[in-house]
Amino acid sequence: MDIDYLLTTSDPVAVQDLFDEAARLRDEVYGRRIFIRGLIEITNHCRNNCLYCGIRRDVKTQRYRLSKEQILDCCRTGHALGFRTFVLQGGEDAWFTDDVVCDIVSAIKGEFPDCAVTLSLGERGRESFTRLREAGADRYLLRHETADANHYAHLHPAEMSFEHRMQCLHDLRDLGFQVGAGFMVGSPGQTLETLKKDLDFIADFRPEMVGIGPFIPAAGTPFEKHPAGSVELTLRLLAIIRILHPHVLLPATTALGTLHPQGRERAINAGANVVMPNLSPQDTRALYSIYNNKLSTHSEAAETVADTRARLKAIGFDIPVDRGDFSKLKIEN
Ligand code: SF4
């Protein structure tokens, strides 16, 4: 595959062929099925100051945390709507100690033994990851953001390190988590060369999940005036990732839906196979403003799911009641 060409060509036939091949491979591994994950944004407190993030430490915003009971209520709503994966996402919030998170994970697994629990709570130590895994967490999302150390330093404050981010991903893998990595498309300082390093990293590490979406500037951050990333380039990268790693679980991200009304459908047609509707309580959704104008902050969970089902059905896909685990199916590639 000539990645340089595919990322830069203006030939619409070549781009459509790329999307078609990615969709074919996705169908071969997973069929015409799109998995849903219920996203629960459990805290917008964060000790970090990532330069691109709308809930970074220095942004003056109203902060919140969900209680265990609120989180379980979100899961109850989600389970009744057919969700079999819950994604607990938040900033790096010291209030969510290992004891607190383990207690929440155990409670979810106890009440919903048919469900997978995914955590996305930033960098933690290996001991912490070990405890979370032992408590029953199945998956962990930690975007690598960039596989280039200099680019990483451009996006993060000096107290954060590329090496530690990579160490976390390797620890998670060692401990038996299904691991999610990913990056923003069009982040400040990104080049064709850094993108190719991202693709090399994905081809080599083979994360079970890869979350990519266009960079969207967030008010009050050092990058608030930087232009948003390209939807078109994001779609090409999704397709290339599907071809490099056909079994990957690949979300059609909210960021794509934010920048383009058909962004998520277009992502599915370029090989994506996961959507993550928001199950967070309505009064906290607007506070989890990691970037400007984030989609779907107002509709009810049930309404969001009904809308998602209808949109996917219209382009020929079903949403099964299924955990949607990583497939180990062998395919001819
Ligand atoms: S990207 Fe994550 S770790 Fe960084 S400031 Fe935002 S919430 Fe915190």
Image: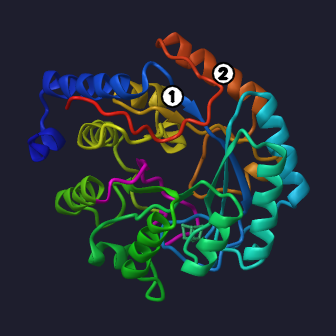
Quadrant of the rendered image holding ligand 1: bottom right
Q: Residue at x 51, y 73 (%)?
A: 50
Residue 214 visible, this angle? yes
Asked if the magenta segment contains residue 208, the reply would be yes
Asked if the magenta segment contains residue 245, the reply would be no
Q: Residue furthest bottom?
A: 159
Q: Is residue 131 left or right of residue 197?
A: right
Residue 300 visible, this angle? no
Please state which of the two labelled residues, at mark 1 or mark 2, is closer to the viewer.
2
Callout 2 environment at 10 Å: few (<14), some (14 to 19), or many (20+)?
A: few
Q: Label 2, secondary structure: give it.
A: helix
Percent coordinates x, y for residue 148 in the rendering: 27, 71
Any atom of ligand 1 within 8 Å of the CB at mark 1? no
Instruction: Identify the magenta region.
Output: 205-224
Q: Residue at x 79, y 58 (%)?
A: 106
Q: Label 1, secondary structure: give it.
A: loop
Q: Is residue 196 left or right of residue 208?
A: left
First reached walking from the N terminus: tag 1 or tag 2: 1
Q: Which disc is residue 307 wearing? A: 2
The answer to which of 234 and 117 lies nearer the viewer is 117
Q: Which disc is residue 270 wearing? A: none
Percent coordinates x, y for residue 230 in the rendering: 34, 44
Q: Residue at x 13, y 45 (%)?
A: 3
Amino acid of disc 2 = Asp
Q: CA distance from mark 1 to mark 2?
A: 13 Å
The answer to which of 231 and 224 lies nearer the viewer is 231
Rendered-image quadrant of the N terminus: top left
Task: Give the labeled residue for mark 1.
Answer: 261
Q: Residue furthest right?
A: 69
Q: Is residue 140 left or right of residue 29?
A: right
